Image (tube, coloured by chain):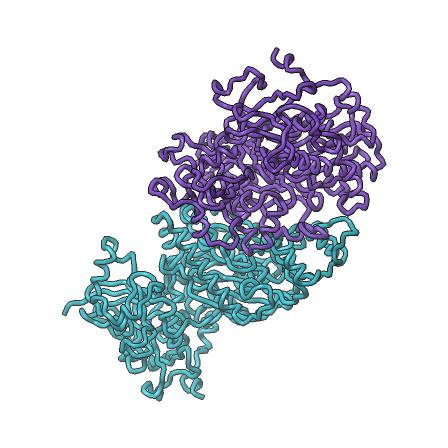
Chain colours: A purple, B cyan
Amino acid sequence: MKKHRIIFQPSGRRGEVADGTNLLDAARNLGVDIESICGGKGTCGKCKVRVEEGYFEKDSMDSRMAHLSPLTDTERKFLKPADGPSMRLACACHVKGDAKIFVPEKSRAGKQIVRKAAKELVISIDPAVKKYFVELAKPSLHEPITGDLERLGAALEKQYGLKGLSMDFTVLKTLQDAIRKGSWSITVSVWKGREIIKAEPGFVESAYGLAVDVGTTTVVGYLTDLATGKVINTESMMNPQVPYGEDVMSRITYAMMNPDGVEKMQKAIIDGLNEIIANVTKDLNSNGSGDGGQQIVDLTIVFNTAMHHIFLGFNPEHIGRSPFIPAVQNELDIKARDLGIRINPGSYIYVLPIEAGFVGADNVGVLIAEEPYNQDERVLIIDIGTNGELLLGNKDKVCSTSCATGPAFEGAQIKMGMRAAPGAIEKVRINPETREPLYKIIGKEDWHTADWNIQKEKLGAKGICGSGIIDAIAEMFKAGIIDKSGKFDMNVNGPRIRRDHDGKPEYVLAWANETSIGTDVTITQSDVRALQLAKAALYAGAKLMMQKMGIEKLDKVILAGAFGSYIDKEAAMTLGMFPDCQIDNVYAVGNAAGDGARMALINLSKRREANERARWVEFVEIAVEPRFEKEFTYAMHLPHMKDGFPHLKALLEKGKAPSAAAIKG
Amino acid sequence: MKKHRIIFQPSGRRGEVADGTNLLDAARNLGVDIESICGGKGTCGKCKVRVEEGYFEKDSMDSRMAHLSPLTDTERKFLKPADGPSMRLACACHVKGDAKIFVPEKSRAGKQIVRKAAKELVISIDPAVKKYFVELAKPSLHEPITGDLERLGAALEKQYGLKGLSMDFTVLKTLQDAIRKGSWSITVSVWKGREIIKAEPGFVESAYGLAVDVGTTTVVGYLTDLATGKVINTESMMNPQVPYGEDVMSRITYAMMNPDGVEKMQKAIIDGLNEIIANVTKDLNSNGSGDGGQQIVDLTIVFNTAMHHIFLGFNPEHIGRSPFIPAVQNELDIKARDLGIRINPGSYIYVLPIEAGFVGADNVGVLIAEEPYNQDERVLIIDIGTNGELLLGNKDKVCSTSCATGPAFEGAQIKMGMRAAPGAIEKVRINPETREPLYKIIGKEDWHTADWNIQKEKLGAKGICGSGIIDAIAEMFKAGIIDKSGKFDMNVNGPRIRRDHDGKPEYVLAWANETSIGTDVTITQSDVRALQLAKAALYAGAKLMMQKMGIEKLDKVILAGAFGSYIDKEAAMTLGMFPDCQIDNVYAVGNAAGDGARMALINLSKRREANERARWVEFVEIAVEPRFEKEFTYAMHLPHMKDGFPHLKALLEKGKAPSAAAIKG
């Protein structure tokens, strides 16, 4: 029977399907969630997907469409021009050739869980933008003529001691009406005590800001009350640049290969941010001075250097090639309207400074959130996103570097890998005697046990997310399924250790009947290799920095990033993701980059700190170190015991994995 | 025979024409110049005119068109959508009802003469925007990574001592390419020593600025070399807002009556300014960094308060009604791109401050150009445009006011009045014995004498411009044709003193056979009245200010504005346009408002001076003075001798008017 290759984006899930397979079924077979309320009957119109560019490089869009069955009347009914080009309903078309399909966020069933939730910050409130209410004396013919702005300026000086304020031009256009609408009383928003960026009639108390973290994969916005510093709403989405490249390097390449590449990707992320702004402000009541986004008077933003450049419309080419020179390193204040960001148009976007090369504003966010420069202890901070960034040091010196970990930690390049969404296996324990696993999936409270009847459950396993992969491979190592080199030990008995149809070893974590996708969920030899490469990059980076700084022992390890918050720190240490450290001194801090953006939003001195410390931190380019290759090879081992791991050894001896019985109880 | 009323704009010429009159003929009969190369044969398509809104308030555009004969095929051939709505060819249509016709600038024969030419200024060169050339060291992997902007900043500090410069966001987007295109050498334009507003590859010496004077009627731009301060090109046009109202108050009214009135008028003037920018920079050679307007790195602008507000998109309503409050008085720096002005997008538009009410940035231009605050002598400065503005004082104190002179000085509301264009009578002498006139028209060197044979000349008289009206009425007074009250003395004999068909007295300045329009050019009783009202407003304003300041005698009178440069100062004094003064101490200084804009362009300290002195000058609202009415009535006399005019008396006794013989010689 004829077969076709098919790839789903952004998950990267791929496989072969029989000619004529329904596209929705193909997606489900590969563990790709596509929304379908009607169950594939063609009546809900939810399963919209896009036939992707890039895969059929020599084909025209027309011939690309021919790899699927022709467009049906049902599809014509549901597909709107606003959906964009090359859209299909997955349930209404059949695979007739190789195809690359992009599943838009709206069509994804089980939206990605926001693993970038905001934690409470302990910081004094002193935002860059503050509101001031003033009552003005009504002008009369019997006094010298004074302009509205000059009258306002005099009142602000008299009542608040604010001198020599300028006013944004867009605000000046609204000033006359605002003053008269408020019967000569007005509330102004003042930026850094020097520029009036908004004028509202009468008394307005509420002031909102937005802290934004643009990750390579995920964008999240924290709507913040500037008076209290509290996050009042959070909104996230897949980075709309993902269709142009899954990682930083592929987006830089896209920018270099396409004359309008930067422009397209910039538009995608600005449009996406505007969507976040519209959604996150939905519940703000109108106060007469414009709804939603118009009520946001300040915005801070972090991203890695490539995302930074593309967001601002800079050519990212030069940061992608030696000597890796960015357009600008320092902080930037840019008028929202100059970027087309739909908040109060007089407001500034505060772009945190970047460190160097790939160590971007996001890592400066981590830096000012965790403040290693204020600590006596030698701390290693690992921020794992699509890239890995490291900070090492204490009050005397802090070094930074970035590691090309690849996307394995996020579930990409892993056969059954998936993002953190309902159905993803997120925790794993393997009985070292029987090699039988226990696992927990996102969306269910309890662990999977022997008496779990998938027939009765609405949700079974669909794949493995990053934390599940770390867990599974650490447990496989402890159970002797793989050895120190990561190789499967095929002498180990049991039905779960087997070879796939290519003869490659794999371990079955869940049988087909325990899943929602009807196929076994397995960990393969190449999954193990992908994870080893990723963790070795992190480890070798940390090791070389320690050597450079003469640090032999870490006092503290901080795991930042969404991923860092969800992995089992003992499993991560078992795998050797970072050098040895007392396990109680390993902390997960969540989205520290986002925390930094939030701090810069609610405390102005944090901006100064960011700019000063970004220059103070010493960037170390580890890829050019002659020793890197050697350290990287050592670090491939599970775990990398060569360096002596007193804490890890103690941990492994204690045998801390819970037994099936313990979990059931 | 049926007659129809017809008005031509922007000249305001009006009259009655017989039913069926060809529109081009009607225009010529009323002294309105419309371009027609083919002589009305319908083959050149030059005589495009617009059927105006506003006149037929209750009519639809369709019924308005019915006041003219139906559209012909010839017209359909020549009229393009780009010409705008309601256009006709004047030669191809006939008057069938009352009509208001606008003659666009392009269709006007004999373009208005630029009477706002730039004079040489004596001022040191220290512009707000300066260019700096720097050579940067090429980055290498063996040094810490430095961003392009930071590398540039360090070089600017080292070579020029410029510290802590910011960079406009639009420039930042071009920086990487500019640096690499110039092989690590670059020329930057720095605004006020603090912001980089342009980056050009390699070495670029030339730096251009534009000084703009937006008059109610005329807009002029002076392209200036910022290194030398020299004007290298001048471009002017009719203010494109004229169709919305001939004077300030009618435009304010238009803004109040139409929801999009401000927006429309703002667009008109911005589009007009962009046209001036495109034309004035036509000859600049490309230097690789963008042509024409892109090479202008600084722009200064003056206008009266209403034009200021409309230009910036502010509602002018509040400056049009008591207590006459402007949105802002102080100077403004506004990014060119925020206004849609097509110069270098990172550049600022410098808007000079305004004084109060109707005393605008143009009068501040006059103030800093003439510097009464640096003088011991008590000087009266009269700036006569469509409005009249007065400054009075010396180093101790300067007061300002504005007078509603109306447009009589510019030839509007005068029966045969016209703008200063070829064919306009600009100088007049009347023989007190014979009451025979001599006159000089624009476009011819010699005076009209008795042996002038109009048949041999290409150009005859077409009407009278402002300076000609002043001359004519002063001479009529001296020849006894009108008395002190301005009334015609019908006892005076001669064929030129007669009554028109309504029985109103008039004086024939030129017989129909001396003209290009085939009708007599006359000065009517109501022309004399219009001029009396205008000059009385100026005089009363000056007189009240003198009283307020306790000044009995003027040391100096300065006539500013295009009009002030062309009138005969003795004639003006004869009419009593300003209080008595030694005639040798009466000076015409040309377009002083424009001079002020030019000074602010080439010397930064002039901007500080403008802002300080605009606040220092005391605005006097003369219309609210109880004595104004009385002074105004006195001042209607020709001349106003009540105050005692020693200098004027001496002048009149000397009988300085040239004899016909003297002129002929």
Residue B467 drawn above or below residue A521:
below
Visible in this render: residue B116? Answer: yes
Which quarter of the figure is the N terminus of chain B placed in?
Answer: bottom left
Visible in this render: residue A126? Answer: no
Residue A432 drawn above or below residue B559:
above
Q: Residue at x 50, y 44 (%)?
A: A100
The total of numbered circles placed on residues is: 0
Q: Nearer the viewer, residue A506 or A276?
A: A506
Where is residue B152 shown, x and y percent of the image? 71, 55
Q: Nearer the viewer, residue A322 or B566?
A: A322
Q: Nearer the viewer, residue B418 or B67?
A: B67
Q: Nearer the viewer, residue B132 or A378?
A: A378
Q: Residue at x 72, y 25 (%)?
A: A480
Where is residue B221 shown, x and y percent of the image? 51, 65
Which quarter of the figure is the C terminus of chain B placed in?
Answer: bottom left
Report the side of A199 relative to B24 (left or right): right
Where is residue A260 shown, x and y percent of the image? 54, 54
